[in-house]
Image (spheres, rainbow, N blue to C red):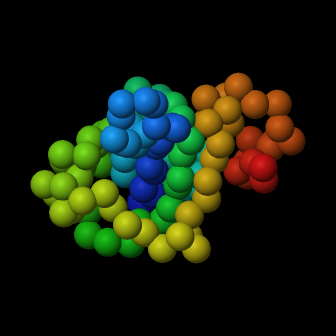
Amino acid sequence: MKQILYISFARPRLPGETTGWLGGAFVEAEGVNSALDRCSKLGINPGGQAVVALYTGKILSEVMDRLLGIQEMKEIFGGVTKFDSSLGVTVCQECNEERCACSSNGTEPPTH
């Protein structure tokens, strides 16, 4: 069953940067892997670590399927979207960028 998922992308902060956050995206998908695949196919997956969570709030159609920067998140949501961490799944940078040889079979998120 498809649902709206929020994906937050980040990487370690580099010297001189105030944040390592790369952006957030809302997509309709069946699960973590399909959400990340959709982001990649749309060209809105900037890499880095991804946290994927079920989004249950109101959503505007114009924010779907786009990589949103911090300014847009502030304007639309009042800041970076918060979500119930019990609903979130963290996907490491290597897995998100498909560079990991972990035991994930592609149907479930990796467990490391």
Give the answer, above or below, for where 14 lies relative to 85. above
The quadrant in which residue 67 appears is: top left
35 with respect to 55 (left or right)? right
Query: Can residue 42 be seen in this snapshot?
Result: no
Q: Horizontal and vertical percent for residue 50?
A: 54, 46
Q: Position of residue 100 (x, y in %)?
A: 75, 31
Q: Is residue 86 above or below residue 109?
A: below
Q: Residue furthest left?
A: 75
Q: Residue at x 86, y 41 (%)?
A: 103
User: Would you say residue 56 is visible in this rendering?
Assistant: yes
Residue 74 screen position, x and y as percent: 18, 55
Q: Using the rendered view, name the quadrant where residue 69 is placed.
A: top left
- The x and y percentages for residue 79 are 24, 59
Q: Is residue 78 left or right of residue 99?
A: left
> Which residue shows up at 26% across the image and 69% down it?
58
7 horizontally vs 32: left or right: left
Q: Quadrant of the N terminus?
A: bottom right
Place residue 4 in its image quadrant: bottom left
Position of residue 102 in the picture relative to residue 83 (left or right): right
For the image, the number of numbered tags is 0
User: Is 86 located above or below residue 41 in the figure?
Assistant: below
Tell me what residue is drawn at x 45 percent, y 57 percent: 5
Q: Is residue 69 above or below residue 99?
A: below
Which residue occupies 48% across, 65% down?
54
